[in-house]
Image (cartoon, helix red, strand yellow):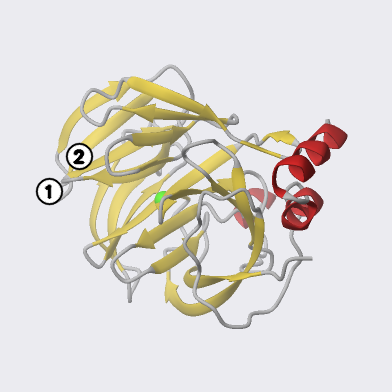
């Protein structure tokens, strides 16, 4: 398969363009310190890129919040937290980390991904196969919907909800009916990319944490191909927490200000970062 890929790449576009992709899309990116550059818009090109990160700002985060979904809107974070008996939806101040509004889920639900579509908050649950729809301003529960898989992450592209279920498949849902209208398998040069977790739609691409790693995949919503890998190693090193706490599974993007935020389960900090492209090798 690898030889076939090489042949096709060389034939279609020339060996120079594809050397970085073939040598790296499936490999763990290198840890690196930061230089300067804005995180770039990800084109839907065929070139795969590696990125490291640079921390621009740090903000407090509730270290008891088992973060499962994060978005940024109107100057606030909206966050979903998990664990049975501790799951919440909350609106959080950027500068202080303080929850200015909080809704606690019934004890039998484990909160997962969260997105805001227009004036509604949509929250998934893990194994209950139930999603909740809240009024963004009041947190009043408006409705609920069901889906046939586990619920992991959710975001949207402006017209469709995009949902992960822990496999390599992304589900595209109608935002009004919550019925599936499409699905897409995510892959890189090694094949399907499984355990797709928290999602965020950034500049036309889907950013996705891959559980249980500290990598973020940048995925084309058109093809499912991983167009870039972000190495988040070293951003946060928890002490006394399980390995799952290493996962950067709170990813939020503010498009107007072009700001990218990352936090994780029980992390005491939200980091504002920018992505630094690694030199092509
Ligand atoms: Ca998100």
Question: Does residue 150 appear anywhere in the picture?
Answer: yes
Q: Which mark is residue 5?
A: none
Which quarter shows the N terminus?
top right
Q: Which residue is mark 2?
A: 134
Q: Can you tell which mark lies on residue 138?
A: 1
Asked if one can make out residue 69 in the rendered structure from this viewpoint, the answer is no
Q: Position of residue 271 (x, y in %)?
A: 49, 71
Numbered disc 1: secondary structure: loop
132 or 253, which lies in front? 253
Outermost top residue: 148
Q: Is residue 91 above or below residue 38?
A: above
Quarter location, residue 78: bottom left
Q: Position of residue 37 (x, y in %)?
A: 54, 78
State the residue at coordinates (73%, 66%): 280
Residue 182 figure quarter: top left
CB-based contact (under 8 Å), mark 2 and mark 1: yes
């Amino acid at each position: 398969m690898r030889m076939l890929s090489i042949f096709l790449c060389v034939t279609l576009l020339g060996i120079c363009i594809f050397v970085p992709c073939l040598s790296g899309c499936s490999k763990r990116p290198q840890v690196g310190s930061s230089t300067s550059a804005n995180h770039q818009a990800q084109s839907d090109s065929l070139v795969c890129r590696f990125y490291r990160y640079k921390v621009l700002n740090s903000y407090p985060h509730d270290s008891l919040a088992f973060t499962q979904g994060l978005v940024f809107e109107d100057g606030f974070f909206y966050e979903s937290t998990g664990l049975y008996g501790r799951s919440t939806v909350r609106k959080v101040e950027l500068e202080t980390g303080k929850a200015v509004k909080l809704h606690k889920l019934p004890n039998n639900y484990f909160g997962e991904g969260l997105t805001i579509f227009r004036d509604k908050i949509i929250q998934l649950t893990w194994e209950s196969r139930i999603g909740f729809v809240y009024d963004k301003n009041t947190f009043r529960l408006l409705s609920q919907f069901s889906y046939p898989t586990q619920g992991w992450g959710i975001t949207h592209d402006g017209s469709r909800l995009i949902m992960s279920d822990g496999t390599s498949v992304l589900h595209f849902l109608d935002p009004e009916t919550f019925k599936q209208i499409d699905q897409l398998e995510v892959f890189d040069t090694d094949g399907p990319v499984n355990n797709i977790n928290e999602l965020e739609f950034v500049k036309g691409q889907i950013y996705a944490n891959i559980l249980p790693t500290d990598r973020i995949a940048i995925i084309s919503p058109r093809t499912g191909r991983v167009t870039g890998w972000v190495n988040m190693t070293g951003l946060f090193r928890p002490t006394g927490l399980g390995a799952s706490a290493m996962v950067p599974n709170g990813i939020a993007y503010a498009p107007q200000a072009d700001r990218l935020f990352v936090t994780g389960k029980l992390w005491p900090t939200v980091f504002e970062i920018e992505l630094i492209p690694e030199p092509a090798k």
